[in-house]
Image: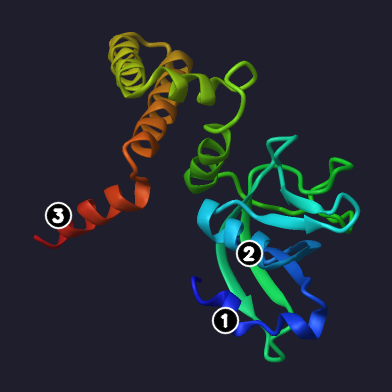
Amino acid sequence: MNNIIEQLDFDKVNGLVPCIIQDVDSNKVLMLGYMNQAAIEKTVSSKKVTFFSRTKKRLWTKGETSGNYLILKDILVDCDRDSLLVKVSPTGPVCHKGTDTCFNETNNKPFDLAYLENVIESRKSMDSNVSYVASLFDKGINKIAQKVGEEAVEMVIESKDNNDDLFLNEGADLLFHYLILLNAKGFNLTDINNILKERHKK
């Protein structure tokens, strides 16, 4: 993705490139925006889709107010070098009106652990007063690791009883905090999956 700018003909589009935003999992078209060179650079470096606002005349990262970011997965340049297809994982509704897409369509995106990882990634830079995830990151790796330990103990305790509801909820708490710890260490479930895959071969 680092050579995207070199592939584009900015003169052809007066410096603003139209960008089709598509959900990488559902293939649903989510919205249309515009990027200049600075917006593309910020999108690639931050992994959060950033546009150039034609009304505000400035860069704006989608989700900077709502927390509903578009996590970058891939960027493709069209054959005429004057538009982009940007594949993303949205962490919430895309339209400012609260709908899944700006075309008033439903984006039937399945909830899975990869989606949850994207939500954690988007929340960690939010205001810690409004985001639990951000508050944990603000407290540092020791606090995050401590929470994983606490949740593990609580799950073990519940496993000794016969309340399936409590056991499963503690398991969900443990997994959620483990994903936060992975992120804090710079890893994700793909890294864990690769290790398990290698072990499976032996």
In front: label 3 or label 2: 2
Label disc, if present, on residue 127 of the rendered structure: none
Which residue is rendered at x = 28% and y = 17% of the image? Answer: 149
The answer to the question of whether label 3 and label 2 lie on touching residues, with beta carbons closer than 8 A, is no
| Left/right of residue 142 with respect to residue 12 in the rendered view | left
Q: Position of residue 172 (x, y in %)?
A: 45, 26
152 is higher (above) or lower (below) than 101 = above
Label disc, if present, on residue 40 of the rendered structure: 2
Which residue is rendered at x = 74% and y = 35% of the image? Answer: 66
Instruction: Give the camera-side residue of 172 and 177.
Output: 177
Instruction: Give the camera-side residue of 113 and 83.
Output: 83
N-terminal label among 1 and 3: 1
The answer to the question of whether label 1 and label 2 lie on touching residues, with beta carbons closer than 8 A, is no
178 is higher (above) or lower (below) than 188 = above
Q: Position of residue 135 (x, y in %)?
A: 51, 19
Query: In this figure, which residue is indicated by the disc labeled 1?
Result: 6
Asked which quadrant contains residue 91, the reply is top right
* Label 1 packing within 10 angstroms: few (<14), some (14-19), many (20+): few
Query: In this figure, which residue is indicated by the disc labeled 3?
Result: 199
Which element is circle 2 on? helix
In front: label 1 or label 3: 1
Q: Amino acid at mark 1?
A: Glu
| Left/right of residue 135 with respect to residue 22 in the rendered view | left
Q: Position of residue 180 (x, y in %)?
A: 41, 31
Q: Which of the image's four quarters has the C terminus?
A: bottom left
The CA distance from mark 1 to mark 2 is 11 Å
Q: Amino acid at mark 2?
A: Ile
117 is higher (above) or lower (below) than 23 = above
* Label 3 packing within 10 angstroms: few (<14), some (14-19), many (20+): few
Asked which quadrant contains residue 75, the reply is bottom right
Q: Amino acid at mark 3?
A: Arg
Which residue is rendered at x = 68% and y = 54% of the image? Answer: 50
